[in-house]
Image (cartoon, grey):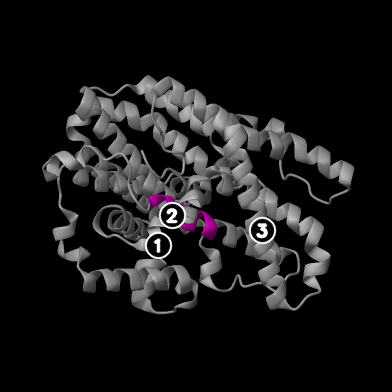
Amino acid sequence: MNQLDSTKQVQYFKGLDVLRFFAAALVVFHHSETIRTKNGFHSMEWLSFFRNGTNAVHFFFVLSGFLITYLLLKENHETNKTNVGTFYLKRILRIWPLYFLLISIGVFMLPVAFGILHIDYTLPFTIGETWYYFLFFMPGMVTILFGNYLLNPLWSIGVEEIFYLFWAPIFKIFKGKIKAVLYSVILIKLILLGFGIYILKDAVFNELVTMLAFEGMAIGGLGAYYFFNGIEFRDLGIFKRYYKFGIYSVLFCYLGFNENIHNNVWDFFFKNGFITKIVMDCFYGYVIIDVSIVSNYKLMQNKFLNYLGSISYGIYMYHMLCIFAIIQFLKKPLVGLNSTVSFFIFFSVVFTFVIGVSALSKGSFEQFFLSLKNKKFGFKIPSPIPANL
């Protein structure tokens, strides 16, 4: 099998499950520290490492674009067509059950439970004001219009669903010009960002444009396109050891200390509302290609970490509810402890609880719908925070 043929027949991209877990863990750290701060804990929120929730979600977007685009390229190569209906049905069976379960829990069940348990928490909206946003996969608009709430993580699922809704038909129509479409998505996003930031200056418009991060999916899609069409990434200078060291060092500094670095050059690239997201999406695309195609890192082959990656959709979806529950029941004893001891106990309990709930959900509730999908289509499909084909 020659190189070009092998790039068109990948069944599994190694290492991406582990990356998916690491990204989900960053989201858990971010929201945990935010909630801990609001509840009187000694917080580490000042350190950028604990403020990477949005960065992790943008990594998921790039990963989604990479894998979904590869899947569509592979399908078209093998069958010479794009079956849009089948594409939609696969996504529905994987995404919708947990999405609507979380809405049912967070919007309908929890307010009743809070009343019974006398927990002082009220949703900042009524279902009459927001039901259509949840139904039509725009929960991000609920956050923009009403503020933060326990289902905040759903905003990214809505963005991915909108991307999926348009991407398969666009791919079917423009499959011979898909590279141009991907570059056009990035260009349009830059135009809209520039218009919103420098001309319109409307907060809601800018938040909505920023939230619909299709440029990240387009950057991931370009990685898939070039790989599928035989680009040998291993031979590119940018993947040589010294360049790799520099790129990972910058990424480490950004994820660990971005808000703590004060430098004009750094600020231009990494604290710039116009270009920073796209710059970082390129970094995430680089990591995805390096881990799954170029390098062979032993850590990315760890079975336990791969398992955690396989349940990371649940980790992402359930973690806010789990954190809130732990705060309600353990706040008093934990706040009274030494801050370091409290920190480690809190996160040990959080990750144990979140992983347990996610594993139970994947093995029972989600698996029911996955089995329907696998019986119908005969192979595994990526989750909405996808890892492999």
Frontmost of labels 2 and 1 is 1
Q: Quadrant of the C terminus?
A: top left
- 24 inside magenta stretch: yes
Alpha-carbon distance for marks 3 and 1? 23 Å
Residue drawn at 57 percent across, 49 percent down: 315
- 294 inside magenta stretch: no
Q: Is residue 194 above or below residue 208?
A: below
* Mark 2 element type: helix
Q: Main secondary structure of the magenta part?
A: helix
Residue 58 visible: no
Residue drawn at 33 percent across, 54 percent down: 288
**Residue of label 1:** 299
Find residue 350 and name its label.
3
| Residue type of the residue flagged with mark 2 | Val
Q: Quadrant of the N terminus?
A: top left
**Residue of label 2:** 18
Q: Nearer the viewer, residue 57 or 199?
A: 57
Alpha-carbon distance for marks 2 and 1? 8 Å
Mark 1, other Cα within 10 Å: few <14 / some 14–19 / many ≥20: few
> Would residue 127 appear left or right of 178 to someone viewing this image?
right
Q: Nearer the viewer, residue 191 or 103?
A: 103
Q: Where in the figure is residue 113, as x and y percent of width and height?
A: 82, 41
Q: Which residue is at the far left?
A: 2
Residue drawn at 11 percent across, 43 percent down: 2
Q: Quadrant of residue 184?
A: top left
| Residue type of the residue flagged with mark 1 | Leu
Determine whether label 2 and label 1 are within 8 Å by CB. Answer: yes
Q: Quadrant of residue 151?
A: top right
